[in-house]
Amino acid sequence: MTDCLFCKIIKGEIPARKVYEDAHTFAFEDIDPQAPTHVLIIPKKHVRGLKEAQVEDAELIGRLHLVAAELGRRRGIEDGYRTVLNVGPKSGQSVFHLHLHLIGGREMKWPPG
Ligand code: AMP
Ligand code: ZN
């Protein structure tokens, strides 16, 4: 999608600190980190958000989580991290290209705010 911040990051049109890429997914450091690890993992395919995902996106959604698990291993934060999908404006979703937050490296509170 042309007018999408995260599509532009995938294409290299907007700079980002890439931490992982494969044929289906792309991951980069969040610009406003909420923890020592705060990475955004996104599909290369433009999907607006979880609400808009279709059955054919099921594998892709799984892939985002498997990338999170791999990055959790690489960063040595397996004693506690969180994966978060904000869905809809009341959740705080501000970018409408599906993105999985990987947050870790500190104590996590429950329930989240
Ligand atoms: P959400 O609030 O779930 O839609 O998450 C959007 C996330 O994107 C926020 O955590 C922002 O800090 C992050 N973000 C916005 N613009 C950029 C950017 N140019 N590079 C990296 N992260 C960004
Ligand atoms: Zn997009």
Image (cartoon, grey):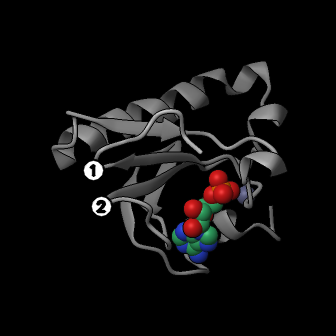
Of badges 2 and 1, nearer the viewer stands: 1
Q: Give the left or right position of residue 24, taking residue 76 as reference.
A: right
Instruction: Decide: is 64 above or below 7.
Output: above
Residue 92 image position (x, y, % from top left): 72, 54
Determine the residue positioned at 49% across, 73% down. Answer: 31
Determine the residue positioned at 36% across, 59% down. Answer: 35
Q: Quadrant of residue 80?
A: top left
Q: Give the left or right position of residue 4, taking residue 22 as reference.
A: right
Q: Give the left or right position of residue 99, taking residue 104 as reference.
A: right
Residue 70 image position (x, y, % from top left): 29, 37
Whichever of callouts 2 and 1 sits on the residue coming sooner in the sequence is: 2
Q: Is residue 9 visible?
A: no
Residue 100 image position (x, y, % from top left): 55, 44
For label 1, the crowd category at 10 Å Cα-Cα, with few meaning under 14, some 14 to 19 and many 20 or more, is some
Residue 49 image position (x, y, % from top left): 76, 42
* Mark 2, residue position: 36
* Mark 1, residue position: 106
Q: Quadrant of ligand 2?
A: bottom right
